[in-house]
Image: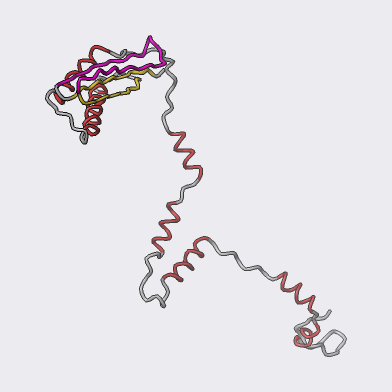
């Protein structure tokens, strides 16, 4: 048998040295040896993070850059897994359908009308009409009426407040409305007021959601 690392062979002749054998290797033999050599291990996630930190906090920078290891780890930890959102949605309480076709407390037209009347008397009893302030005053009255009616807690009702205000100059005014609704559950309340300077008409619609 022949040993590459030895200087003699069994027949007594001198064997070629390792250098001579390496010279005789062809290009294809070298490529086969390089392919059989162990491949470098791919960089892990933390190796890439450390390399990035060295680039941002190197000695050339002098002082650590704000986007250092702490900022990078914070960004990495803040990323949520897609399954986390699904788990959160599953943890939410799912309510069953009530199959309720009518309100527990119907829209009380008389109580709503009295509430509107109290607000109109308190705000517009002696209020002069000013065209520059009429818009803001109308919004203020509308919000006050809506808040007052919401406090009555008509469950599962959509409330719509419509306000009309104008100056009083001896003219006639008619305010009308037409709605498509369920007459068994939906209703409205209208109230008006006038003084020497202005008139105001407010209508509150209570529409029930099944």
Assign the N terminus to one quadrant of the image.
Answer: bottom right
In the figure, is residue 13 to the left or right of 83? right
The quadrant where residue 76 appears: bottom left
Q: Is residue 113 left or right of residue 47?
A: left
In magenta segment, residue 114:
no
Residue 200 percent coordinates (x, y):
22, 22
Give the x, y percent position of residue 16. Answer: 81, 88
Identify the coloring. Answer: secondary structure
Per the picture, the main secondary structure of the magenta-coloured stretch is loop
Residue 42's place in the image compared with 185, above or below, is below
Q: Nearer the viewer, residue 52 or 26?
A: 52
Residue at the extreme front of the image, as rendered: 170
Residue at 72% across, 70% down = 35
66 lies above or below 172: below
Q: Residue furthest top?
A: 184
What residue lies at 60% left-to-right and 66% top-to-bottom?
41
Q: Quadrant of residue 142?
A: top left
Q: Position of residue 7 (x, y in %)?
A: 78, 88
Q: Viewer-proximal residue, 23 or 74? A: 74
Quarter holding the C terminus? Answer: top left
The quarter holding residue 119 reads top left
Q: Residue at x 38, y 10 (%)?
A: 183
What residue occupies the far right of the structure in this picture?
11
The region drawn magenta spans: 169-195
Q: Residue at x 42, y 16 (%)?
A: 180
Of residues 166 and 148, the one drawn nearer to the viewer in this rendering: 166
Q: Is residue 159 left or right of residue 39?
A: left
Residue 154 left/right relative to 85: left
Asked whether residue 179 is drawn in magenta, I would say yes
Q: In the figure, 79 relative to 207: above or below?
A: below
Residue 46 in picture, x, y percent from top left: 49, 62
């Amino acid at each position: 048998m022949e040993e590459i690392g030895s200087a003699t062979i069994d027949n007594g002749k001198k064997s070629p040295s390792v250098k001579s054998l390496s010279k005789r290797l062809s290009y294809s033999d070298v490529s086969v040896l390089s392919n059989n050599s162990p491949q470098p291990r791919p960089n892990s996630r933390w190796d890439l993070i450390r390399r990035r930190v060295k680039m941002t906090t190197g000695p050339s920078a002098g002082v650590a850059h704000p986007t250092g290891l702490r900022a990078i780890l914070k960004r990495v930890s803040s990323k949520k897994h897609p399954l986390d959102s699904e788990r959160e949605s599953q943890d939410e309480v799912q309510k069953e359908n009530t199959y309720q076709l009518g309100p527990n407390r119907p829209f009380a037209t008389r109580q709503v009308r009295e509430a509107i009347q109290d607000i109109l008397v308190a705000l517009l009893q002696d209020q002069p009409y000013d065209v520059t302030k009429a818009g803001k005053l109308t919004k203020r009255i509308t919000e006050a009426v809506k808040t007052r009616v919401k406090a009555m807690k008509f469950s599962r009702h959509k409330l719509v407040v419509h306000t009309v205000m104008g100056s009083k100059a001896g003219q006639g005014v008619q305010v009308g409305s037409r709605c498509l609704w369920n007459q068994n559950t939906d209703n409205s309340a209208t109230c008006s007021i006038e003084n020497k300077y202005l008139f105001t008409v407010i209508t509150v619609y209570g529409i029930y959601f099944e």
